[in-house]
């Protein structure tokens, strides 16, 4: 009984801490925001060159004018739309931050090679197959299946 209560107590402590930390981060305005591919290009010209030749870069312009206003299409064709519900020229298409996470916080940390700090600030250094499937799934009207190895081969952008 005693152990059970101790477990219960420590569980609720963890809960309170989590809520507390979340609250502090929000209070300090520490939610990462999307900043756009132009910022990433400043230091990652090599990756940018590969990306700008990919279909992800054209994902917004490939929509017809009416589709560019249809919320049903934008979540997978505009960077950060699911989070912000906004369409701006800076966020057109599937940019770096769609896969690597919104950059306003980690952009100040990760160039120093602080991998742990960057991860805490929201950098997804190694986007996985599952992250692709948040868009490459049957909810896409043009979906014909998803083969990671084949598709990654078309967009890979190594150092
Ligand atoms: C001021 C320069 C600078 C800017 C701006 C910048 N980066 Fe980087 N980035 C770097 C450097 C330097 C490294 C290598 C750091 C290291 O050795 O771990 C890096 C590494 C990375 C990595 C690999 C991380 C890892 O752990 O292997 C990713 C992914 C990345 N950047 C994404 C981005 C994205 C996305 C943006 C735009 C939101 C961006 N970067 C903007 C300088 C920059
Ligand atoms: C936020 C949504 C989103 C995510 C995440 C995403 N994609 Fe895409 N992807 C798209 C859209 C939208 C297109 C179609 C763009 C167009 O043709 O206008 C596309 C097109 C592609 C294409 C070109 C397909 C073709 O038929 O020519 C490849 C390759 C691709 N994605 C690979 C990937 C891989 C690999 C990942 C994960 C590492 C990934 N994508 C993650 C939205 C996404
Ligand atoms: C469709 C998703 C997607 C997009 C868009 C994307 N990346 Fe990546 N990126 C990945 C994946 C997946 C990896 C490989 C991660 C791994 O090695 O595990 C990667 C790797 C990287 C690396 C590390 C390369 C290495 O070999 O160590 C850097 C740096 C990087 N991306 C920067 C960028 C920048 C800058 C942009 C925009 C110009 C961008 N990425 C756009 C998914 C994406
Ligand atoms: C769940 C995410 C998702 C939604 C929602 C979505 N798309 Fe896409 N779209 C994709 C992906 C991923 C691709 C790449 C091809 C594929 O796998 O379907 C794509 C490709 C496309 C293409 C390029 C097709 C080609 O053959 O090159 C067009 C055009 C397009 N979508 C239009 C739309 C329209 C119009 C809507 C809204 C009615 C929409 N999409 C909604 C994810 C999505």
Image (spheres, grey):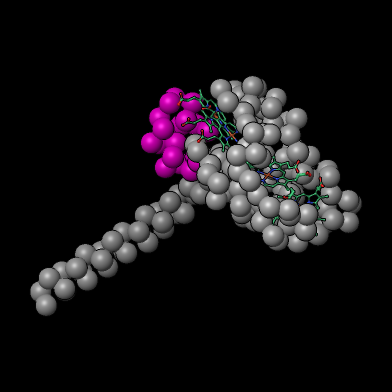
Q: Quadrant of the N terminus?
A: bottom left
Tell me: residue 159, above or below residue 61: above
| Count of numbered marks | 0
Q: Quadrant of residue 22?
A: bottom left
Tell me: residue 88, above or below residue 36: below
Magenta-drawn stretch, dominant element (helix, strand or loop): helix
In the image as oriented, which residue stretches furthest toward the right? 65
Q: Where does the magenta region start and end?
A: 106-124
In the image as oriented, which residue stretches furthest toward the bottom? 1
| Towards the viewer: 129 or 22 | 129
Q: Position of residue 7 (x, y in %)?
A: 19, 68
112 falls in the magenta region: yes
Evaluate whether residue 10 shows in this view.
Answer: yes
Residue found 41% across the figure and 32% down from its top? 115
Residue found 27% across the figure and 68% down from its top? 12
Q: Quadrant of the C terminus?
A: top right
Residue found 53% across the figure and 42% down from its top? 127
Q: Position of residue 101 (x, y in %)?
A: 55, 43
Image side of residue 50 versus residue 5, left or right: right
Residue found 73% across the figure and 53% down from its top? 144
Q: Position of residue 141 (x, y in %)?
A: 77, 58
| Towards the viewer: 108 or 122 | 122
Evaluate whether residue 73 shows in this view.
Answer: no
31 falls in the magenta region: no
Q: Position of residue 91 (x, y in %)?
A: 71, 43
């Amino acid at each position: 009984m005693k152990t059970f209560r101790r477990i219960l107590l420590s569980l609720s402590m963890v809960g309170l801490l989590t809520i507390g930390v979340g609250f502090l981060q929000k209070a300090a305005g520490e939610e990462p925001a999307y900043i756009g591919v132009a910022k990433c290009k400043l230091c990652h010209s090599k990756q940018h060159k590969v990306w700008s030749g990919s279909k992800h870069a054209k994902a917004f312009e490939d929509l017809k004018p009416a589709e560019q206003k249809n919320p049903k299409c934008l979540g997978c064709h505009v960077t950060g739309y699911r989070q912000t519900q906004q369409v701006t020229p800076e966020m057109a298409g599937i940019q770096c931050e769609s896969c690597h996470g919104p950059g306003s916080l980690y952009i100040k940390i990760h160039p120093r090679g602080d991998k742990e700090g960057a991860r805490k600030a929201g950098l997804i250094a190694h986007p996985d197959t599952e992250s692709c499937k948040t868009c490459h799934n049957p909810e896409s009207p043009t979906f014909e299946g998803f083969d990671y190895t084949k598709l990654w081969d078309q967009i890979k952008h190594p150092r």
